[in-house]
Image: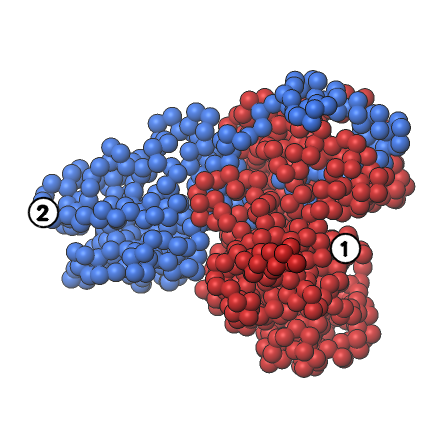
Chain colours: A blue, B red
Amino acid sequence: MVSLTINNKKVSVPEDLTILEAASRNGIKVPTLCHHPQLTPFGGCRLCVVSVKGMPKPVASCTTTVSEGMEVTTSTPEIEDLRKLVLELILSDHPNDCMTCEATGSCALQELAYAYGVRGEAYPGERRVYAKRDGNPFIERDMEKCILCGRCVKVCDEVQGVEALDFTYRGFRSKICPSYEDDLDCEFCGQCVSVCPTGALTGKQWARRGRYEGVREVDTTCPYCGTGCTLTTHVKGNEIVRVSSKPWTPNEGWLCVKGRFGYKYVSSPDRLTKPLIRRASGEFEETSWTAALEYTAAWFKKIREKHSADAIGGLSSARCTNEENYLFQKFMRAGVGTNNVDHCARL
Amino acid sequence: MTNSIREIEGMEVIFIIGSNTKETHPVIANRMIKAYRKGAKIIVADPRTVPMVKFAEVFLKLRPGTDIALLNSMAHVIVKEGLQNDAFIREKTEGFEAWKNSLEEFTPAKAEQITGVPKADIIKAAKMYGGSRKAGIFYTMGITQHTCGTDNVRTIANLATLTGNIGREFTGVNPLRGQNNVQGASDAACLPNVYPGYQKVDLPEVRRKFEQAWGVPLPPKRGLYATEMMNAAVDGSLKALYIMGENPILTDPNQHHTIKALENLEFLVVQDIFMTETARHAHVVLPAACSFEKEGTFSNTERRVQRVRRAVSPPGEARDDLSIIMELSTAMGYPMDYRSPEQVLEEFGRLWPALAGITYDRIKSRGIAWPCPTKDHPGTEFLYKDGFAKKVPFVPIAYNPPDEVVCENYPFVLTTGRNLFQYHSGSMSRRVGAIEEHAGEAYVELNPADGGKLGIANGEMVKVSSRRGDVEIKARFTRRVSEGTVFIPMHYREAAANVLTNDALDPDVMIPEFKVCAVEIVPLEKKAAKEVTASAK
């Protein structure tokens, strides 16, 4: 443990922490853009600069580790001017089209611009124009909105182990892309989308379905594999418009392509909406619930009387809930009178 | 899983066998990669160069169905090197000497002959796993879906027992569950031989307990397994089937047999969210709500009971399965009237102490892993902390080849599984436009050398036939598969892998051998040409 002061507050933290982590653990907020707590530090955006007594220049708090007796100040007029300058420069090369941007309301850049009152008018000049769009069906990449924070590059490498993205070119032409500037052809987990601080990376199927107004969040468990990731569904009206996950969930906020983008079947026009009975002609005919269930019960009873309860079987589902599975087997055993009940654990 | 997903981070060695973790459990693979970044060593054993191989220190590319030879040989090396956990063996196990003698024949040289894995790699993997006391084994259907599935699992258990890699934090045996609630469906006893909580139906005192709880006499004998039900439908002894949320026509082996079974039934009722291939054969189809439209719980692969919440309402007149079952049961003369799903979970918990402490209120922000016997119990991250009910037996396991082996007429080994983008029979994932656009086409993975021998180019159509049927499918050249082995994902109804698969069963648990069968491959165009010549004659 080392002792230091941050904004004249005495704190004691493990020696391998950065100044940013030490501040954060003690409830002191330092603005950041490129930093992400689940990724290794980058030190690219310079927004987290702080003043350390004895050091000639402000230092990036996300890449500087604490040391004994350090005296840190996270906000001075000079530092705030530096932060404002950084934001002005970023916004000078940004489309500033928050009106139609999917990220509005959840954009770190927008929030900081708001907090610092920066409109991006201080340094007019050339802007990056990237007309080409990525042809993949999952992830929209609008590189004009990219602030080159590198979070997507890091998450794809460090967390996903895929390395589908990297920095290319230099200086003003710097750009994040897949190899040879091809379209993305990766696992489409969307981890990059989840850590992007702006609207540069978004889900294609989110587009114009809903941002914050009228959107509710409902947490549930993913319906695909057995990992059991916690999903946050974003619901507008009676439609799921987006799926995300929070970093404090058992899955640490990471999802796969099916969990993040595989929800559209819910609103598929193919969904069954009415009970159906097969008529003598062989065709299905819509019917009422009462008629369908009485017909089913009558058939089960007839077969039980004519043969035995063991002439009836039930296959339940690993897709259904614990409660439904419990009740299904109870129905087969106590209601029908057979142990002929199984599910697809082996299939 | 005997461990939790979190514990993966603390493991020194991660041994993945018969699991394509990166594609079928991608977020568990994230945790393995996190462990790898912290210095964990990864061993992968699989017939295909699956994506996790990128992170593996050792990759054992074994022939399909030869797992027992590989694992027994690893145990052989561990014993020869003296890496076994003597204290654990002495205190907690029995039958070690006899088992040890059974390993004698499984030299790395012999295992190399059977598995095709170089003996040096077998030795390296054995030393790595045996040399660690924080090692976890991870497997899925690549281990279980064989006629020797139970023996495969026993061999894994032997390996963990030999090294004492079980019953502590960061070490254990971890079957990864393939479906959202396959753990819960098993716990809830949608199984023919047990009541909820794995309590055996053929024990009179257990049956009396459930007869008392449910207020009716219960049948004393075990029922039929799913695979047996299909056979009983074919032979006419099973007359009616109630299927809730399953699509056996695509997910059972030997599709022609399954269709014959369903068509032979007097009455079939299917409750589902879509008109599946199976529902098309039904007499009654009941429209159900999907998981985003109802309240309840799922139990994940680490036994964590987690909430399922209603985000949207079901379409049209579709109803949640709970209310359908209740009404049907009442119509059958066995009334059910639960006010909420939570009442059902409470009843389940009264009959199985492992769930007794779990309430919706306790799991509102984070699930709890069972066993959780009381309302103040925190749940159980890893199993067997307090030891085992009895001594753990070492079971000698002999190696036997799969039910079907290659021959002149069927010279390729077919193995099946999932890919990253689609899920199971595809009834959900294939209705997601983006997924279908990206991964909507069936394919057979074929080694380029085999493709060359067949005289086809990458992307050409081929006909794959087994003794049970044939499919027309696009060839995808890839070195993921070795020469002589091919792979077809199970998701695509238009070229269903399960038309081809073998319905031979493991004698203990009736699991079919989806992972190995023998097939023939011919170029589609040449086949057509041959047929033309034949008909001209």
Question: Taking B64 as reference, is A102 left or right?
Answer: left
Give the foreground label among 2 and 1. Answer: 1
User: Where is the N terminus of chain B found, in terms of image quarters?
Assistant: bottom right
The kind of secondary structure element at disc 1 is loop
Q: Residues within 10 Å of mark 1 (few under 14, many from 20)?
A: many
Q: Which residue is mark 1?
A: B505
Confirm whether residue B372 shows in the render: no
The kind of secondary structure element at disc 2 is loop
Chain at tag 1: B
The residue closer to the viewer here, B102 or B119, is B119
| Residue A23 x, y percent position in the rendering | 32, 51
Counting the numbered discs, the total is: 2
Question: Taking A98 as reference, is B329 left or right?
Answer: right
The residue closer to the viewer here, B86 or A5, is B86
User: Where is the C terminus of chain B found, in terms of image quarters?
Assistant: bottom right
Taking the spot 28% from the left edge, 53% from the top edge, the residue there is A149
Taking the spot 57% from the left edge, 40% from the top edge, the residue there is B427
Taking the spot 89% from the left edge, 39% from the top edge, the residue there is B220
| Residue A104 x, y percent position in the rendering | 29, 36
| Amino acid at pointer 1 | Leu
| Residue B113 x, y percent position in the rendering | 67, 78
| Residue B306 x, y percent position in the rendering | 58, 40
Chain at tag 2: A
The dot on residue A125 is 2
Q: How far separated are the C-alphas under marks 2 and 1?
A: 72 Å
Question: Taking B174 as reference, is A211 left or right?
Answer: left
In the image, residue A298 sits, relative to residue B475, either above or below, namely above
Q: Quadrant of residue B233?
A: top right
